[in-house]
Amino acid sequence: MRQRTKRDLIAAIGVAVVLAAVFLVNDTFDRQLLAQQKDKERRKWETEREKSGMEILRWSHMQETEGSLRSGPVFTEELKQWDNKQVNVIGFMVPENEFRDIKEFMLLPLPIECYFCKRPPMHDVMHVVMEEGSTTNLWEQPVLINGVLRLHPGPNDKYFYSIDQAALAPAEAGATLQRRYIDPEHMLPQHEQQEELQEGIEF
């Protein structure tokens, strides 16, 4: 009887391990699919805006930046040409401090959940400061940001780049933005969220 109970317990543990592995694989696949869909969506509106005559700063320009928080960034010559100039960039909002009446936020090429609950690389994080007297809400869809690009070349800077005096609009011309709900597991305490993003990674 004791041996049978032991076999049943081993079998139950085996089933649990298999189910956990299946869940993990499915979850990873779902997130990869979501990332592909969101990347495709952002690129679509970048292309549409360019067709309408708007010059777009694409994330591919930023993603060629190398470095880390400790070493500081190494910008490409092409990206340096955008420094201190008015730019248009499309991305997904991530709150920094506020979740409504937002004055500052982070902009990423993908929604935060597409990074598999890991910190995004430093070259995927842009700090955005709304123009004086202006605030916004947290939106579900990709947004179009217009403002002045600032490159931060020094080490130990919170961000590689930021946009000041920003104005915000839907990435899709004429669309209506929908408020976004943040899942509790993605609502890190402020100090933890900053630590996650500030550490950066070598790439």
Image (spheres, rainbow, N blue to C red):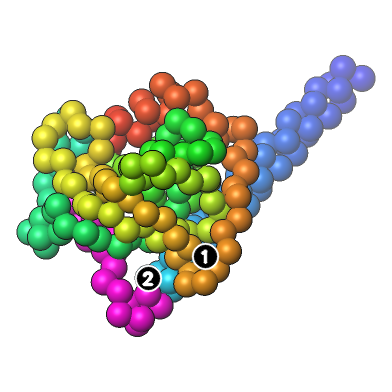
Tally of numbered discs? 2
Q: How dense is the environment of label 2, judged by Cα within 10 Å: few (below 14), some, or many (20 and up)?
A: many
Front residue of this view, candidates 203 and 184: 184
Residue, disc 1: 37
Front residue of this view, candidates 51 and 32: 51
- In the image: residue 77, left or right of residue 29: left
Amino acid residing under circle 1: Gln
| Residue bounds of the magenta highlight | 47-67
Above-or-below relation of 102 to 58: above
Residue at image location 62% in from the left, 38% down from the top: 183
At numbered mark 2, what does the secondary structure look like: helix, strand or loop?
helix
Direction front: furthest residue: 133
Residue, disc 2: 46
Residue at image location 58% in from the left, 64% down from the top: 176
Residue at image location 41% in from the left, 39% down from the top: 103
Residue 71 is situated, as x and y percent measured from the top left of the image, at 13, 33
Residue 8 is situated, as x and y percent measured from the top left of the image, at 83, 29
Residue at image location 87% in from the left, 17% down from the top: 2
Direction bottom: furthest residue: 51
Residue 38 is situated, as x and y percent measured from the top left of the image, at 49, 62
Amino acid residing under circle 2: Glu
Earlier residue among tags 2 and 1: 1
Q: How dense is the environment of label 1, judged by Cα within 10 Å: few (below 14), some, or many (20 and up)?
A: few
Q: Quadrant of residue 49?
A: bottom left
